[in-house]
Amino acid sequence: MKPIKRLWPMPKNLEGYGADFYKRVGRQLISVGTLTELDRESFISLCGAFHLMQKSLDSVNESGLNVKGSSDDIKKNPALTTYKNASDIFHRLTKRFYLTPGDRKGVDLKKPVEDNGKGTYFK
């Protein structure tokens, strides 16, 4: 299957951190030729997981690691559980797209060279 040349239209339900990630990382993955038509749903899931992960961190930074429970006892911030689940999904999917240095080890992701005829004369 051939790599796609343009990023798909952004899903309407993707927002905030996920939308930024979609645009930034999507452009980079297209430039190195790693996204194909079959990757669409996995890539959208990756962006959604990134959004949940970052929003959870925002909540933890805002409210702290421990929060008041309904019966006035202190408990662990529920956003930590959301963060853990989202980060597990995110890290599992990053391997599919070679997004960490360990995943790229042994894989050569170079930007495709476009030959416009000048390469023969200007090396």
Image (cartoon, rainbow, N blue to C red):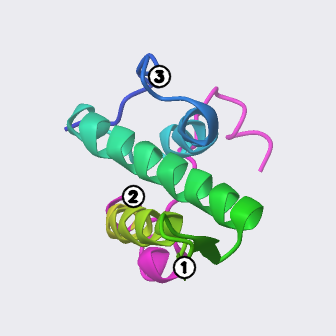
Which of the two discs, 2 and 3, labels the residue nearer the N terminus? 3
Instruction: Report which residue position mark 2 lands on.
Output: 97
Residue appearing at x 50%, y 61% in the figure: 109
Crowding near pointer 1: few (<14 within 10 Å), some, many (20+)? few
Rendered-image quadrant of the N terminus: top left
- Which of the numbered marks, if any, corresponds to residue 86? none
| Towards the viewer: 107 or 88 | 88
Which of the two discs, 3 and 1, labels the residue nearer the N terminus? 3
| Towards the viewer: 100 or 62 | 62
Judge whether residue 120 is colored magenta: yes
Judge whether residue 29 is colored magenta: no
Extent of the magenta region: 95-123
Q: Is mark 1 on a helix, strand or loop?
A: loop
Q: Do the residues labelled 2 and 3 touch (CB within 8 Å)?
A: no
Between the C-alphas of marks 2 and 3, the distance is 17 Å
Instruction: Report which residue position mark 3 lands on.
Output: 6
Residue 118, by quadrant, is top right
Q: What element carries label 3?
A: loop
Which of the two discs, 2 and 1, labels the residue nearer the N terminus? 1
Instruction: Report which residue position mark 1 lands on.
Output: 73
